[in-house]
Amino acid sequence: MQNGFGKLYLVGTPIGNLGDITYRAVKILSDVDFICAEDTRVTAKLLSHLEIKKPLISYREHSTESDIRRIVERIMSGETAAEVTDAGMPSVSDPGTKLVAACINAGIEVDVIPGPTAVTTAAAISGMNVSRFSFEGFLSVSKKQRFAHLNSLKTDSHTLIFYEAPHKLITTLEDLLDIFGDRKIAVCRELTKLYQEVLRTTVTGAIESFTERSPRGEFVLIVEGYIPPKTEITENVLEEAAGFAKNLIEDGMKPTEACKISAEKFGVKKSSIYDEIKSTDK
């Protein structure tokens, strides 16, 4: 214990298949004094499957500051607590960050028990380039905020990952087409569950597919990043691209990675940038 306080454990739980729970997660859930759950009914089913009986406290998006304070006070009195979300990792597209921040500010030790999360699961199976990606979570239900969010990403070269609910899927796909154009996309549905599906297509293809059948389950969308239109390479552009790559190299990045990033930024072949750097270094 730290300062006589208890401890908060952030415990990753299965996103679908209950067999994905880790041995360490089971041990922590068995050992803590109480569990803070996004939906106590969902967590009760998981605990029943694991044959664990523990007091559950509701901690969700609409929990008040006084709710958080009561949890913190219990931990400060010496009790240990686990925080879980309905599925996946607490604090990832989840209100858990508020409780974590409150515990840290109170001097309580916070530990994490890693587990499944839909964003990396979808990234791994998507078939897209996810060496660099930007996780954007759920888009706003407000059209104005949603459009502002998407427009801010319009020229982002990172692969983009979104969560989406079935009743909003078609609207979101149409917004992606309107703002991003017809990019490659992987639509992942019901990951790790019985009816898991990964549709690798274009945004238009996804709209056609889910217009023909009603979207069901939880979705993760992996969208191709912005690719600048190919333009005629002028000597000035090549020099600028080579200079940009050299700055990255001087900051410690490997030449191949620096040339790749510069190529994406300036629309110049990676090999041309590499040759330009070599010629100027002679």
Image (cartoon, rainbow, N blue to C red):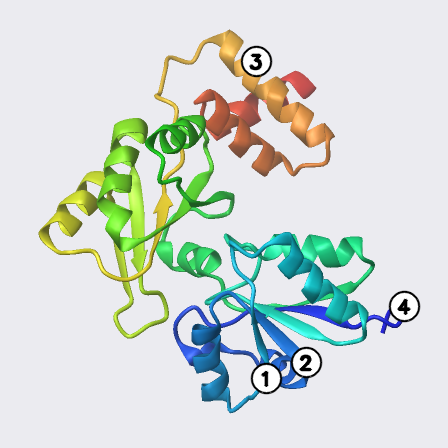
Cα distance in 3D space between marks 4 and 3: 59 Å
From the viewer's perspective, is residue 69 above or below residue 239? below
Left or right: 160 in relation to 248: left
Cα distance in 3D space between marks 2 and 4: 18 Å
Residue at the right extreme, as displayed: 3
Q: Which residue is mark 2?
A: 32
Which numbered disc, 1 or 2, marks the residue that appears first in the sequence? 2
Q: Residue at x 46, y 30 (%)?
A: 156
Cα distance in 3D space between marks 3 and 1: 64 Å
Left or right: 182 in relation to 131: left
Asked where in the image residue 282 lies, by quadrant, the reply is: top right
Q: Which residue is mark 4?
A: 3
Q: Residue at x 68, y 31 (%)?
A: 249
Which numbered disc, 2 or 4, marks the residue that appears first in the sequence? 4
Callout 4 crowding tier (Cα within 10 Å): few <14, some 14–19, many ≥20: few
Q: Which residue is mark 1?
A: 54
Q: Label 4 sits on what residue type?
A: Asn
**In front: mark 4 or mark 3?**
4
Q: Secondary structure at mark 3?
A: helix
User: Mark 2 near mark 4, Cβ–Cβ under 8 Å?
Assistant: no
**Residue 239, which numbered label?**
3
Please state the total of marks drawn on the protein image.
4
- Given residues 7 and 58, the one toward you in this image is 58
**In front: mark 1 or mark 2?**
1
From the viewer's perspective, is residue 44 above or below residue 202? below
- Report x, y in % for residue 81: 68, 73
Left or right: 13 in relation to 281: left
From the viewer's perspective, is residue 115 above or below residue 242? below
- Given residues 189 and 147, the one toward you in this image is 147
User: Mark 1 near mark 2, Cβ–Cβ under 8 Å?
Assistant: yes
